[in-house]
Every structure is written in C-alpha cells, then in structure tokens.
Amino acid sequence: MANDTEIEIKIPLDKATFSQVKEKLKKIAKFVKTSNHLDEYFTPSHRNFVEPKFPFEWLRIGKRGNKVILNYKHYYPENVKVATHCDELEIEIQNAKQLRKLFSALDFKELVTVDKERDIYVFNNEFEIALDAVKDLGYFIEIEAIKNFGNIDETRKKLFEFAKTLGIDTSNPDLRGYPFLMMQKKGLI
C-alpha cells in the first residue's frame, strides 16, 4: 500500500479451488508473470525471531530468477495471532554467497527454505494476486493491496471482499506465513 507497508491476506486452497481461481483470474485480471521463488529464512542468534509465541519478524534471502533480494518483514501488532500489516524492506544483493558468509560470521542461523512456483496477476490496479504452489505445503493465494483504500482496516476488508468474489472461503486465512508453516511441518516449532 505505502512505500514500505504491505497489507495482504494469504489463504490456503485445495487443488480444485486453486485451478478454478486461476481460470477466473485469466478472465478478469492481467497476467504479469510466472516465477520460481527460493527463499532461505534466517534468524540472528542474539534475537531469535521464532522465540515469541507469534513470530512477527522474518529475514530472508530470496532468489527470483537472476535476482537475489534480501528481505526483512516486521508484522504489526507484534506477537499477536492476527497481524494486520507489516513493514517490508528489500534490497537487491549482488553476491548472495558473500551475504551468507556475513550471516555466518554474525551468527545468523538458517531456519528453513521455502520453494514455490508463483503466478502473478493484477486486478484493476487495486490488487496484486499471487497463486502459489509451495513445495511440501500445498496451494495458496496471496492478495495484496496496491491501491490505497484509506486505512489498514478498510484495506483488509477490501482484500477479503475481493477474495470472496473469486469464490474463495475466507474463513481460514493463513496467519503465520510460509516459513512458520514449514517450521511447523518439520517439527521445529
């Protein structure tokens, strides 16, 4: 929504709903691209991001084709079950190998890796929609506001309303994100 503020919802989908939503998006939204995302998540040893009951910070090295991006997200409100938005800071990295060495020297620990195939669509310059097939986790839709709807609550309301127009059951959104789900699946939390 704003420069470094991200307001989005993520909802798990079964394979049939995923396919139906994809067909609907092909008709009503602009297809942007398909890409593979390989995201390595890290935590500093001096401030373990997964220590709180509801983690609210993530640090990742993300590979997007030929690009490597360092990304930090800080969710608000902190340490609650339902976060409403996050600060998102990103910078393109020229040498991922050196960055990993730097992380090692600073005693950052790798948590998990998330591998996903992503199709991106844009609807009316209001929403960016990502359909994700996530290795070992399944199918998801992420809908992010790219238009300013006034405030966080109104924006979240619009996100859920749009999801319903796609035929999605919005009663069970993912509240923790892919790294949390992956750590849960691997028994790390």
Image: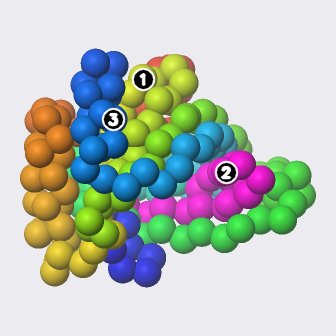
Question: What is the three-letter code of the residue carrying label 3?
Answer: Lys
Residue 54 vs 87, above or below: the answer is above
Q: Residue furthest front?
A: 27
The number of numbered badges drawn on the structure is: 3
Q: Which residue is mark 3?
A: 22
Q: Which of the 4 quarters of the picture holds residue 172?
A: top left
Other-residue count near label 3 (Cα within 10 Å), few / some / many at <14 / 14–19 / ≥20: some
Asked if the stretch drawn in magenta spans residue 108, the answer is no
> Measuring 50% from the left and 41% from the top, which residue is drawn there?
118
Q: Which label sits in the foreground, 3 or 2?
A: 3
Judge whether residue 156 can be spotted in this image: yes
- Find residue 159 and report its horizontal and vertical position in percent: 19, 56
Disc 1/disc 3 C-alpha distance (Å): 15 Å
Q: Earlier in the sequence, mark 1 or mark 2?
A: 2
Q: Earlier in the sequence, mark 3 or mark 2?
A: 3
> Measuring 15% from the left and 52% from the top, which residue is drawn there?
162
> Measuring 71% from the left and 68% from the top, which residue is drawn there?
92
Q: Main secondary structure of the magenta part?
A: strand
- Find residue 123 and report its horizontal and vertical position in percent: 29, 59
Judge whether residue 12 can be spotted in this image: no
Instruction: Give 142 or 175, whichever is nearer the viewer.
Output: 142
Q: Earlier in the sequence, mark 1 or mark 3?
A: 3
Q: Which label sits in the foreground, 1 or 3?
A: 3
CB contact under 8 Å: marks 1 and 3: no
Question: What is the three-letter code of the residue carrying label 1?
Answer: Gly
Disc 1/disc 2 C-alpha distance (Å): 20 Å
Disc 3/disc 2 C-alpha distance (Å): 21 Å
Question: What is the three-letter code of the residue carrying label 2?
Answer: Arg
Q: Which mark is residue 64?
A: 2
- Find residue 151 and report its horizontal and vertical position in percent: 17, 77
Asked if the stretch drawn in magenta spans residue 75, the answer is yes
Q: Which residue is mark 1?
A: 138
